[in-house]
Amino acid sequence: MSIASVISDEILERFRLRAAEYDETNSFADEDFAELVELGYLKALLPESQGGLGWNFEQLALAQRRLATAAPATALAVNMHQVWAGVAYLLTARGDHRLSMVNRWIAEGEVIAFGISEPGNDAVLFDSRTNAETQPDGSVTYSGTKIFTSLSPAFTRLGVFGKDSKTEELVHGFVAKGDGVQSLGDWNTLGMRASQSHTTKLDSAVAPAQWVHTRLPVGPNPDLLIFGIFASFLTLTASVYVGIAERSVELGKDALTKRKHHDGSKYSQDVRARGILADAAMHMITLDALQRSVARDLDLMVDHGAQWFPKLVTLRTVAGDTARANIQSAGQLLGGGAYFRGSEFERLYRDVQASWYHPSNAASASNTVASWLVGPLED
């Protein structure tokens, strides 16, 4: 099935209209989410024989981008489920079946969220402040705090990791929503409000032995799981901001088509306005090529070696930078009416600020690329 046949223009218009209400009331995108479930969107990467859409990873990335042109917060929320679907997809394609349970859960209708980020942990996947205690039966209990848990009202499974104090290993597993998993309901933010990305407290939350899938040493690691998480998270999160960058160009185009100066001349004939729009469009064309090439290379299993992580962090960073710049350009073209609360521009202007905070941040991305080129910083 094509992307446009699943996420049609009519669906996008409904989502765009609802986005303003969700933002105003600081509420979860319940109706959007229900429609996406009904469309089979949460099963997009599963083959049609398993009830999925049979898409590849590039198609999912482009679909997330299309969804974000109408409702970025909805796209960001469902993104966390799609990240785990993407990790399972990328690992399975490479002959690693440790996350086969994720594919099974998705086929059964489970909704999976991403419980990785922790307050004050800038090591991200390479260390953890969450305690992971292994029990005699092989299960693991997790105790700690996870932040930016998008999809909090809807998830049924949460992918987490923590550090075992006895073995000094980082232990990756899944816990079910319920005992020991508490959402603090604290999401009241500048933008991306409909994602409802609450803080989650883990208090001896149990991952059954069969849900504990990976143990790794502290520090950078070439394990395929780490690559899969970074690849899926960075590419799909970037897609949300590519969508905002694309919508910004559309808003600017509409402004030049419809607005006139006081003397009656068209904005489309204003050299300065045309230049602002053209610059935004050129940035979008560049970003489009980058997004497609990275996602396609993941599907094709291209061996970029040590260049893979620089490519992934560059996509995520450039997507955020371009989205913020293009929104600013749109603001120069739309006029003062867009400054009022409730306009689509005003909401997008706030939503795009979340791009500052997703891993990898600008400093981390810069260090990743520099380390690839000239080696790591010396002690």
Image (tube, helix red, strand yellow):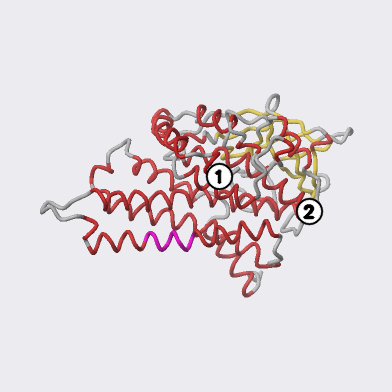
Lower sequence index among marks 1 and 2: 1
- Residue that label 2 marks: 217
Residue at horizontal 33%, vertical 55%? 329
Q: Is residue 115 visible?
A: no
Comparing 153 with 43, the one in front is 43
Q: Residue furthest bottom?
A: 374
Q: Main secondary structure of the magenta part?
A: helix
What's drawn in magenta, residue-wise? 280-287
**x and y, in percent, of residue 327 in the image:** 37, 51
> Which amino acid does the dot numbered 2 rest on?
Pro
**x and y, in percent, of residue 106 in the image:** 70, 35
Label 1 to label 2, Cα distance in Å? 40 Å
**x and y, in percent, of residue 69 in the image:** 45, 45
Where residue 3 is drawn, which disc sits there? 1
Q: Is residue 252 above or below residue 198?
A: below
Q: Residue furthest left?
A: 263
Q: In this view, does 18 lie above or below 270?
A: above
> CB of mark 1 within 8 Å of CB of mark 2?
no
**x and y, in percent, of residue 148 in the image:** 56, 40
Quadrant housing the C terminus: bottom right
The crowd level at tag 1 (other Cα within 10 Å; few <14, some 14-19, many 20+) is some
Comparing 64 with 77, the one in front is 64
Residue at horizontal 42%, vertical 40%? 190
The crowd level at tag 2 (other Cα within 10 Å; few <14, some 14-19, many 20+) is some
